[in-house]
Image (cartoon, grey):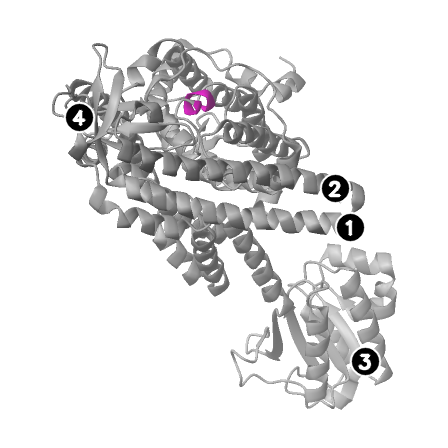
């Protein structure tokens, strides 16, 4: 088979598939699918999407990433960190779970896929190195904590607000702990106990699947849901109706203001393009937009107060023979002669037109049967600018997560990986996923480990996983109706516990204080900026680059003396070493580039000032790996400046790439071939031959009567 064909279709390397390999892949694929199906639904909700969109993201993206990737065991699909980044970036643009939010998430998947695909095609996988390991460690720890805390409300069965400050939202949840729905908490705790117990005592069993099956059957058998839809015309209690209508008016006010903000924002952007930002009407419209936002925040606060007042209000209902709602009454004012059902309800999820009667726990509910429709994502040009930076962050973070997992597995399987091909695989999976209504995906550590431990030999195992998800979409979705939302929250919490690794932050600190600062700063920034997690990782990446530049701006400069074995060593380490009044030897441990050439010049001039009788300055350049235009310019002027005062600048041990720059710019001729040496010993020998008898009593380097180096 032609090598060029395998380059475009890397999955051809799997073939021909032998019977034992296909059997191993089949078993591994089924095993991963049993973990992926409930996990994908949980991560969909973490991403702010309806649960069933997780199944869409677990279908074609899983297979495409395996077919065009380079790792045989990497399992792609919805993952916690990428899902949270998706939710945090889109929550400011649309209400989570709304049609607009879903459309933006699908569009984001397309943008992420395009970015990754371009990076892979142009072999720019090295760009991921801009996110250093300490930054990723700090971000991952903070994100894991945020993910876990974001699920607490579902675990306790209480509502959680969404604001610009995640910490305030969490504080609000803990204030409502007294309203905990005990059956919901029991379901969540049961699921955690099952998964923890199986992980500890029977790790080979699919703990997530067992927890889902047990809790779903229990939910179905006890009638865990007990919820119903409600409309204001069904309320037969005038006092209750007045309270509900007041809250609905507040909800309507919020909706109207948000719609107005969207319209004003679009009009402002259009006017800025046509009339410019300094136009009087543009400035006026910008002020109107800001005023609308202030009004919206005030209306949102008022609506939250209305909902808080309803939170403790219990109602009952009368029903017909089919269980449909006939009338709704306040619990303490229900008529004695009306037949009521046995459940007490609370009013939740209030909108401008209806509400939900919640008498039990939240379940996944009805999942559309069949495959997702295949179509191009709806492009929102107004949101494109906001999503591009997020797409870049998700592309890099998602790929770094995927390639780190793939490398860890490849170290055990001894498979050779191609990072750029992996970028292509991840990019194609997100592009294809966006065409089938999926949100951004990446490589999963937990499922990849399951895949490898289950015996997967090729990427065919992921194709089989996707086929099993296909069967679920076609035939098995009704079985998931009674799955409690608290169980999905428990799945996420158990999955992210393993991501919290504070020892890694401590390790980074011990390795380098600057790395430790970058890790801690990223951790704090991510928590502080939540839910805008992309800001946290941007701060960390910028700080890491800044600290790197700071380190290289002041590299180590050592004044050298002669050790007993003839080598040159740092006087700061060995202060009693003999030196020369005729020669100053300096070692520069860093590249000569724009950020540190001034430091190099100052170090040389300071050494000359401290040795007024010196006629030669030897720069031991073994540690100089690079010379840029700024470095060449400074060295050029330094050579001429010292030469004008009778001092010669000599270099030893320069690498080929540095000498090539010197030759190309003419610096080689300025320094002189007779002042460039391969080793420090050759340089010192030549210098002392030039000094002759004047240096016969020099302790730094003894010279024989004939003037030869000895």
Please state the horizontal and vertical placement of residue 54, each as a whole percent of the image.
42, 25
Quadrant of the image for the C terminus?
A: bottom right
3D distance between C-alphas at marks 1 and 2: 9 Å
Residue for badge 4: 343
The residue at the point 47 percent across, 59 percent down is 521
Asked if the residues shown at circle 3 and circle 2 are in contact, with their CB atoms under 8 angstroms apart, the answer is no
**4 vs 3, front mark:** 4
Quadrant of the image for the N terminus?
A: top right
Alpha-carbon neighbours of circle 1 within 10 Å: few (<14), some, or many (≥20)? few
**3 vs 2, front mark:** 2
- Give 188 or 91, whichever is nearer the viewer: 91
Please tell me whether mark 1 sits on a helix, a strand or a loop.
loop
Residue for badge 2: 271
Q: Is residue 491 left or right of residue 632?
A: left
Prevailing secondary structure class for the magenta stretch in the rendered image: helix
Query: As displayed, is residue 525 above or below residue 676?
Result: above
* Residue at far front of view: 238
Can you tell which quarter of the image residue 209 is in?
A: top left
3D distance between C-alphas at marks 4 and 1: 61 Å
Residue for badge 1: 279
3D distance between C-alphas at marks 2 and 4: 55 Å
- Give 146 or 640, whichever is nearer the viewer: 146
């Amino acid at each position: 088979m032609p090598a060029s064909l395998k380059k475009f279709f890397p999955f051809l390397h799997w073939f021909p598939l032998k019977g034992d390999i296909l059997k191993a892949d089949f078993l591994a694929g089924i095993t991963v699918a049993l973990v992926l199906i409930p996990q994908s639904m949980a991560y969909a909700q973490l991403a702010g999407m309806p649960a069933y969109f997780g199944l869409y993201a677990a279908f074609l993206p899983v297979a495409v990433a395996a077919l065009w990737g380079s790792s045989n065991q990497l399992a792609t699909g919805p993952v916690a960190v990428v899902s949270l980044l998706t939710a945090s970036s889109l929550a400011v643009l649309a209400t989570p779970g709304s049609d607009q939010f879903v459309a933006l998430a699908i569009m984001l998947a397309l943008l992420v896929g395009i970015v990754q695909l371009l990076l892979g095609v142009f072999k720019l996988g090295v760009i991921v190195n801009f996110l250093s390991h300490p930054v990723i460690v700090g971000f991952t720890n903070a994100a894991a904590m945020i993910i876990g805390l974001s699920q607490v409300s579902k675990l306790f069965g209480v509502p959680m607000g969404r604001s610009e400050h995640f910490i305030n939202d969490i504080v609000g949840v803990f204030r409502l702990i007294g309203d905990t729905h005990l059956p919901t908490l029991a379901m969540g705790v049961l699921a955690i106990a099952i998964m923890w117990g199986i992980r500890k005592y029977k790790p080979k069993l699919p703990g997530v699947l067992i927890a889902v099956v047990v809790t779903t059957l229990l939910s179905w058998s006890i009638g865990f849901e007990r919820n119903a839809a409600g409309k204001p015309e069904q309320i037969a209690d005038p006092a209750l109706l007045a309270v509900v209508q007041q809250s609905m008016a507040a909800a309507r006010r919020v909706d109207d203001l948000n719609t107005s903000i969207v319209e004003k924002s679009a009009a402002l952007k259009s006017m800025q393009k046509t009339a410019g930002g300094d136009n009087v009407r543009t400035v006026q419209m910008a002020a109107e937009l800001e005023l609308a936002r202030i009004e919206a925040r005030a209306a949102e606060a008022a609506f939250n107060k209305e909902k808080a007042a309803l939170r403790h209000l219990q109602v009952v209902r009368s029903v017909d023979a089919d269980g449909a709602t006939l009338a709704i009454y306040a619990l303490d004012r229900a008529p004695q002669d009306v037949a009521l059902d046995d459940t007490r309800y609370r009013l939740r999820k209030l909108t401008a037109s209806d509400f939900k009667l919640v008498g039990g726990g939240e379940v996944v509910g009805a999942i559309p049967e069949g495959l997702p429709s295949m179509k191009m994502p709806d492009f929102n040009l107004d949101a494109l600018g906001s999503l591009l930076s997020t797409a870049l962050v998700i592309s890099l973070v998602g790929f770094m997560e995927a390639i780190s997992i793939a490398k860890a597995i490849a170290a055990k399987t001894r498979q050779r990986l191609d990072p750029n091909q992996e970028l292509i695989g991840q990019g194609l999976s997100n592009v294809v996923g966006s065409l089938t209504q999926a949100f951004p995906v990446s490589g999963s550590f937990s499922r990849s480990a399951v895949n490898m431990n289950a015996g997967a030999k090729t990427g065919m195992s992921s194709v089989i996983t996707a086929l099993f998800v296909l069967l679920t979409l076609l035939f098995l979705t009704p079985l998931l109706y009674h799955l409690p939302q608290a169980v999905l929250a428990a799945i996420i919490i158990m999955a992210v516990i393993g991501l919290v690794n504070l020892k890694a932050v401590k390790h980074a600190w011990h390795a380098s204080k600057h790395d430790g600062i970058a890790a801690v700063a990223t951790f704090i920034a991510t928590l502080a900026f939540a839910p805008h997690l992309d800001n946290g990782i941007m701060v960390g990446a910028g700080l890491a680059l800044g600290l790197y530049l700071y380190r290289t701006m002041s590299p180590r400069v050592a004044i050298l003396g002669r050790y007993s074995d003839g080598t040159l060593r740092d006087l700061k380490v060995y202060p009693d070493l003999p030196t020369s009044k005729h020669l100053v030897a300096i070692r520069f441990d860093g590249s000569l580039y724009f950020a540190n050439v001034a430091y190099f010049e100052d170090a040389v001039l300071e050494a000359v000032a401290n040795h007024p009788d010196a006629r030669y300055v030897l720069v031991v350049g073994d540690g100089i790996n690079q010379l840029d235009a700024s470095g060449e310019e400074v060295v050029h002027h330094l050579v001429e400046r010292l030469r004008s005062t009778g001092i010669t600048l000599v270099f030893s041990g320069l690498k080929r790439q540095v000498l090539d720059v010197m030759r190309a710019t003419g610096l080689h001729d300025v320094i002189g071939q007779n002042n460039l040496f391969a080793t420090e010993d050759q340089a010192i020998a030549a210098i002392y031959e030039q000094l002759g008898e004047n240096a016969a009593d020099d302790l730094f380097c003894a010279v024989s009567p004939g003037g030869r180096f000895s």
